[in-house]
Amino acid sequence: MSQKCRQPPALVRTSDSGYRAWCRSFREKSETGRSRDPFAQDYHTELMRWELVVQKLLAAAIPNSVDERILFSTQADRKGKVVPIYHELDFVSGTFIEPQLFVEIKIREQSINKKTGWPQLNRSLSIARAQWPNLRGICVNIAIGDLLGTEQECTVSTTPIPDLGEAVADLSQHDGATIWLSGTAVAAFAVKQTLLTHGDVHRFPDLRRAVLNPTIVLQSPEARPETNRPALFDQFRPRP
């Protein structure tokens, strides 16, 4: 198939049938023969909840959020066949016909982390700007070390929640900008908006510790056997 058969980039929703089929295929390939760590899954699920909180926060601070945040494009594979490619975006504003801003969200256990998320965001922007050359981007990092106990204090300057919209508008004019938010401030927003409970925030460090040392679940005096879940170490056995 020739270069002319490629389709221009477009934005679709997470419910798009093509995207869902692509995700199923990718997941099946990546999970083949791989055993699952239930504690890592629980922690990852909680991180996804935090990402949703930040998405809600951004929607409150930035006008015109877009539900279509899956970037669809096509590329030629090794055999020259044009195949679909999807990139999930954490937040998009503007319209799905004319997006104005892509946002990459990263939850950081330590603010000393030098990674910004820009390599991933740049890949999406380089594809999308073929269709929308004026598109802007920004990374938003959430420093949760103060909540997890992975650092005593944040080592970078954080943006107050009320100033987030203005900061994004100013810094997104040039590629490479990253905004840091305090995990404590994000947690307060989440609890106020009933996106998380105080109990969720307090249990967050326990989920991370269980990933690092699963035996603490057995050592906890609050641990009780559950009849509707497999035994602790049975959860690590590969599924048939």
Image: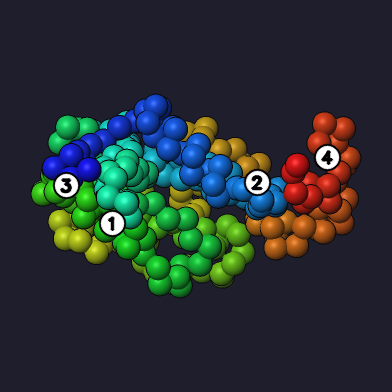
Q: Is residue 58 visible?
A: no
Q: Earlier in the sequence, mark 4 or mark 2?
A: 2
Where does the N terminus fall, quadrant-wise?
top left
Name the residue carrying label 1.
123
Task: Describe the element under mark 2 as helix, strand or loop.
Answer: helix
Q: Earlier in the sequence, mark 3 or mark 2?
A: 3
Q: Nearer the viewer, residue 157 or 114?
A: 114
Is there a contact, CB below 8 Å, between mark 4 and mark 3? no
Q: Position of residue 198 (x, y in %)?
A: 61, 41
Q: Earlier in the sequence, mark 4 or mark 3?
A: 3
Name the residue carrying label 4.
230
Q: Nearer the viewer, mark 3 or mark 1?
A: 3
- Give the label on residue 3, or none: 3
Task: Describe the element under mark 4 as helix, strand or loop.
Answer: loop
Q: Nearer the viewer, residue 236 or 99?
A: 236
Kind of residue sitting beneath label 2: Asp
Q: Earlier in the sequence, mark 1 or mark 2?
A: 2
Q: How is the image coloured?
A: rainbow
22 horizontally vs 31: left or right:
left
Where does the C terminus fall, quadrant-wise?
top right
Kind of residue sitting beneath label 4: Pro
> At 18% across and 45% down in the image, what residue appears?
2
- Give the label on residue 42, or none: 2
Kind of residue sitting beneath label 3: Gln
